[in-house]
Amino acid sequence: MFKSASLIAAFAAMAVSFNASAGLIFSEDFSSGSSSLKNSPDIVWQDSDGGSFEVYGSGGAGARGMSGTFDHDNDPLTPEIPLYGAIEVNDDRGDVLLTATFELAEEVFPSSVGTLSYYAGVRGNNGSGASVEIYNVTQGFSLTGELSPTLGNVNWVHNSFDFNWGASNQGDQIQIRWAGGGTNSANGQEVSFVSLSSSSAVAVPEPATHLLIGFAILGLALRFRTNK
């Protein structure tokens, strides 16, 4: 009886752990141009001026005063590589709000740590008022508040922000918001290689998992009764 109960308990624990998942939620390197932003089935990109997105590759960085290479692994000891692509937030006018909206596909613990990272630059040496924020649109609350990124002048600077998911639920609409800052379309925040991840997410247990847990509890109860 002891061996059976132990095996059932171990199997149930394994089933629960296999339902847990964590890691990358989404990333965008802007390498496919504006079309990848407009046609993404999972991420809806919009900007507040209603114009077309100004996405560019390494060849267009120089015209904006930025380097055509970036420190892809955030390690100054390794060589920089050509920029995959980037997006100019102030594409048509000053202080544009650029948003990326997606559905949270998995249930997350309130204490789960999310991480937003991206490379940021500034055009025209003026990014005054530039910010980034993660917002739960469904429930109407900010996960981060408005954050002030570090904007690289010429060189791209890696930014990384940790946050808790709080009361966010599976199916909620989550939105990343970049404010361009600056004063016109020739200055403000530039964004490259966006990555959003979570330290842990948990899927809803399958009925079979509940059954296994029930068997484990029953087995442990019987074992306790036998040993009395």
Image (cartoon, helix red, strand yellow):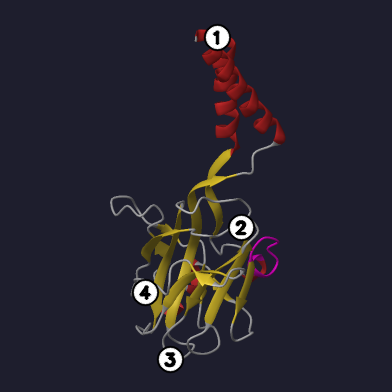
Name the residue located 37 percent from the left edge and 62 percent from the top edge. Answer: 158
Amino acid at pointer 3: Thr
Q: Nearer the viewer, residue 87 or 41?
A: 41
For the residue pair 83 and 180, the one nearer the viewer reads as 180
* Disc 1 from disc 3: Cα separation: 78 Å
Residue 131: x and y in percent read 42, 76
Name the residue carrying label 3: 183
Q: Nearer the viewer, mark 4 or mark 3?
A: 4
Comparing marks 3 and 2, which lies closer to the viewer?
Answer: 2
Looking at the image, do the residues carrying marks 3 and 2 touch, with CB atoms under 8 Å apart?
no
The residue that disc 2 covers is 104
Per the model, the C-alpha gap separating discs 3 and 2 is: 34 Å
Q: Splitting the image into 4 quarters, where does residue 10 fall?
A: top right
Residue matched to label 1: 226
Q: Which mark is residue 148?
A: 4
Where residue 104 sits in the image (x, y, percent)? 61, 57
**Front position in the image: 150 or 58:** 150
Which residue does the image show at 61% across and 28% down from the upper left?
213
Which type of secondary structure does the marked residue at label 1 adopt? helix
Bin the neighbour count of mark 2 within 10 Å (Cα to Cα): few under 14, some 14-19, many 20 and up: some
Mark 2 or 4, closer to the camera: 2
Residue stretch rendered in magenta on the structure: 36-43
Neighbor class of circle 3 (other Cα within 10 Å; few <14, some 14-19, many 20+) is some
Instruction: Give how far apart the Cα atoms at labels 1 and 2 are.
Output: 47 Å
Q: Is residue 72 magenta?
A: no
The image position of residue 155, as x and y in percent, is 35, 68
Give yes or no for contact between labels 2 and 4 (Cβ–Cβ under 8 Å): no
Image marks 4 and 3: residues in contact by CB distance under 8 Å: no
